[in-house]
Image (tube, grey):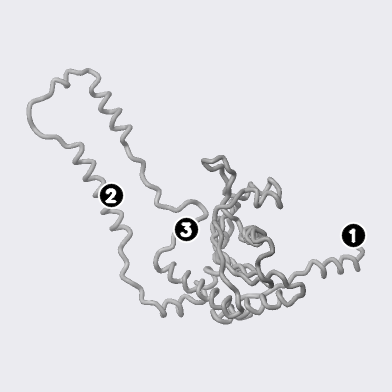
Amino acid sequence: MKISCTAMFTLLLQLRRASVASAFQQPARISARNVGQRSIASSSSILLAKEGGGGGRSSAAVADKDLLNKTTSDKQSNKKVALDTNPPKGTRDFYPADMRLQSWLFNQWRQVAATYGFSEYDAPVLESESLYTRKAGEEVTQQLYNFEDKGGRNVALRPEMTPSLARMVMAKKGGLPLPLKWYSIPQCWRYERMTRGRRREHYQWNMDIWGVDGIEAEAELLSAMVMFFKNVGLTADDVGIKVNSRNVIGEVLTELGVP
């Protein structure tokens, strides 16, 4: 089961902003504009202090015919490019107010997971690229933030958590007691076209059950999902749950004579 933090943020901001805001006292905010002005003023003061000069007689260097060109060239090379204060495309900043809402949401996920007996885990945000290409093929690299590190290893920022979970379970070589009930709230990265509510950086709530053959695992995960929605005040008027089964689809297609 996976729930995206980005979409949930948008929904909760619309439906729960009033109730959540009342639970926290908003601290005094510092004007970003004033901070920016102070930073720029400080930088300017440093540059002006370097460029200033004292009195006294002129230097013999004035006779140098190339002095003007040298001075102009030095100033151009030292010219600073204005800092882009926007985060990289597809990412976002979390100011204190945003972090309070995120922490509240993550705590809701953790409480539900603990109620159903799940244990939290995590893995490196940086994984070997082969962890994703061995199953999905080389074309998946078009959707990865991937690169070659200084040691010549092909690595990638994780686009999802399931491959990391499988790697961790395989690393124990059957040494983990089953059934396995783990959950995570990973930060994931996908280099793909952005749409409304879908960025290149996102968080998601994962709940995984290993070692259960029947449908009991799916039923438990659906129950946990419903509990979370109820806890945050979301009803059937706000969200819906759709269940998909390949076996059912296969039987339907067979009855219709579709190969």
The quarter in which the C terminus is drawn is: bottom right
Residue 152: x %, y % from top left: 56, 40
- Precedes in sequence: disc 3 or disc 2: 2
Which residue has dot 3 on it? 92
User: Which residue carries the number 1 mark?
Assistant: 259
Q: Label 3 amino acid?
A: Arg
Within-10-Å neighbours for mark 3: few <14, some 14–19, many 20+:
few
Is 96 left or right of 106, judged from the image as shown?
left
Query: Disc 2 designates what residue?
Result: 40
Q: What residue is drawn where x is 89% and y is 62%?
A: 258
Q: Is residue 146 left or right of residue 133?
A: left
Give the spatial CA distance, label 2 vs label 1: 68 Å
- Percent position of residue 122, x then y: 55, 63
Q: How many marks?
A: 3
Q: Label 3's element?
A: loop
Picture quarter containing residue 238? bottom right
Q: CA distance from mark 3 to mark 1?
A: 46 Å
Query: Disc 3 vs disc 1: Cβ atoms closer than 8 Å?
Result: no
Which of the marked residues, 2 or 1, is nearer the chain's N terminus?
A: 2
Name above or below for residue 100 compared with residue 141: below
Query: Is disc 2 surrounded by few (<14), some (14 to 19) or many (20+) residues within 10 Å?
Result: few
Q: Earlier in the sequence, mark 3 or mark 1?
A: 3
Contact flag, marks 3 and 2 (Cβ < 8 Å): no
